[in-house]
C-alpha cells in the first residue's frame, strides 16, 4: 500500500524544518511526502531541496490569501498513493507516526490521531535549536514538562501495549477529531470530492471533511498513544464565523459530496 503524507504549509520554514526532521526518524520507511504550499516564497523550496533522503514532492499555488483547501485538493488529485495522511506544517510526527497510520488503515474507516500541545517556551527552544525534537519522544520528560505546565495532553503520547488498548479506549471512548492528523483512503477522499474550497480563511474545513466522511459511511478509528504528533504553539487564528455558518447549512441540507471540491459540480450533490 502506497502512503503519502500531505503537509499543508505556508512560509513557516522554521517549523517545517522541525516537522521534516521528524519524518527523517520514521520507523516505517515506505512513504512519500507532499508539501501542499499555499503560496510561500522560495525559502520552502530551498528547504525541501535539503531533504534528498526523503521522497518529497512540492505542489505550490500563488498567494491569494488562505486557500488551504484548494492546494490540498491539488495534492490529492496528483497523488499516486492509495492512502493519504493529512497534517500541517507545525505538527512534528512521532517516530511511529506513519507506521501507526499504516497499521490502522482500512478502506471503510478513517483514522484520527492524537496530539500533544507544545507550549510557547518549549516551542521556542525547539525553533532556536536549544532543544532537539528527540526530547519529545521521551515520555518521562514529556510528563515532567506537563507537570510544569509547559506541555499539555502529554498523557496522549503514552504508547500503551496493544493488549491494553481496548481498556484504554473504554476509559476515553471519544477522541478529539481534527484535520491535522487524519488519514483515509484516497478513494474515499475522492468519493466525497475532497475538501470544500468554499471555505476560505482558517478553520472548519477539517470539521466539514470529517463530517462528510462519517456521513459517507466511514467509521472513525484511533487509539491513545497511536499516530502521535506534537503541535508547536503559534499565534491563535481568528474564529471564522462565516465558515461555521456554511458548515451548518451544509449539514442541514445533507450535502456529503461538496460542490466546489476536487471536481467543480453543480446541483445538489
Image (cartoon, rainbow, N blue to C red):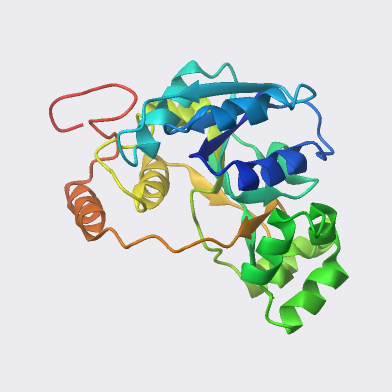
- The residue under the point 39% across, 60% down is 237
User: Which quadrant would the C terminus be assigned to in this image?
Assistant: top left
The answer to whether one can see residue 178 in this image is yes
Q: Residue at x 84, y 54 (%)?
A: 134
| Residue 1 visible to the viewer | no
Residue placed most toward the observer, 163 or 19: 19
- Quadrant of the rendered image containing residue 126: bottom right
Quarter placement of the N terminus:
top right
Residue under the image location 53 percent in, 61 percent down: 234
Residue 166 placed where, x, y %? 72, 63
Answer above or below: position of 116 versus 187.
Answer: below
- Position of 176 compared to 205: left or right? right
In the image, residue 42 lies at what x, y percent?
A: 53, 27
Q: Is residue 84 above or below residue 223?
A: above
Horizontal side of residue 230 vs 245, given as left or right = right
- The image quarter in which residue 26 lies: top right
Of residues 193 and 12, the one nearer the viewer is: 12
Judged left or right of residue 125, residue 90 is left
Q: Quadrant of residue 136?
A: bottom right
On screen, 169 above or below 206?
below
Amino acid at each position: 500500500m502506497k502512503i503519502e503524507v500531505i503537509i499543508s504549509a505556508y512560509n513557516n520554514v522554521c517549523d517545517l524544518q522541525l516537522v521534516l526532521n521528524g519524518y527523517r526518524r520514521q520507523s516505517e520507511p515506505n512513504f512519500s511526502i507532499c508539501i501542499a504550499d499555499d503560496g510561500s516564497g522560495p525559502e520552502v523550496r530551498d528547504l525541501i531541496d535539503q531533504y534528498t533522503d526523503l521522497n518529497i514532492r512540492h505542489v505550490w499555488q500563488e498567494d491569494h490569501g488562505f486557500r488551504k483547501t484548494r492546494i490540498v485538493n491539488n495534492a490529492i488529485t496528483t497523488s499516486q498513493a492509495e492512502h493519504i495522511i493529512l497534517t500541517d506544517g507545525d505538527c512534528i510526527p512521532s517516530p511511529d507516526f506513519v507506521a501507526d497510520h499504516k497499521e490502522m488503515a482500512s478502506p471503510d474507516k478513517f483514522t484520527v490521531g492524537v496530539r500533544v500541545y507544545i507550549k510557547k517556551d518549549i516551542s521556542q527552544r525547539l525553533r532556536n535549536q536549544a532543544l532537539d525534537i528527540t526530547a519529545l519522544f521521551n515520555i518521562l520528560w514529556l510528563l515532567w514538562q506537563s507537570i510544569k505546565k509547559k506541555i499539555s495532553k502529554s498523557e496522549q503520547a503514552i504508547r500503551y501495549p496493544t493488549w491494553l488498548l481496548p481498556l484504554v479506549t473504554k476509559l476515553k471512548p471519544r477522541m478529539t477529531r481534527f484535520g491535522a492528523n487524519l488519514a483515509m483512503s484516497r478513494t474515499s477522499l475522492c468519493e466525497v470530492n475532497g475538501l470544500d474550497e468554499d471555505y476560505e480563511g482558517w478553520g472548519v474545513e477539517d470539521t466539514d471533511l470529517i463530517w462528510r466522511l462519517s456521513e459517507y459511511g466511514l467509521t472513525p478509528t484511533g487509539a491513545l498513544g497511536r499516530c502521535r504528533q506534537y503541535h508547536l504553539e503559534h499565534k491563535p487564528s481568528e474564529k471564522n464565523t462565516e465558515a461555521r455558518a456554511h458548515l451548518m447549512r451544509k449539514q442541514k441540507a445533507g450535502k456529503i459530496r461538496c460542490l466546489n471540491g476536487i471536481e467543480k459540480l453543480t446541483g445538489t450533490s
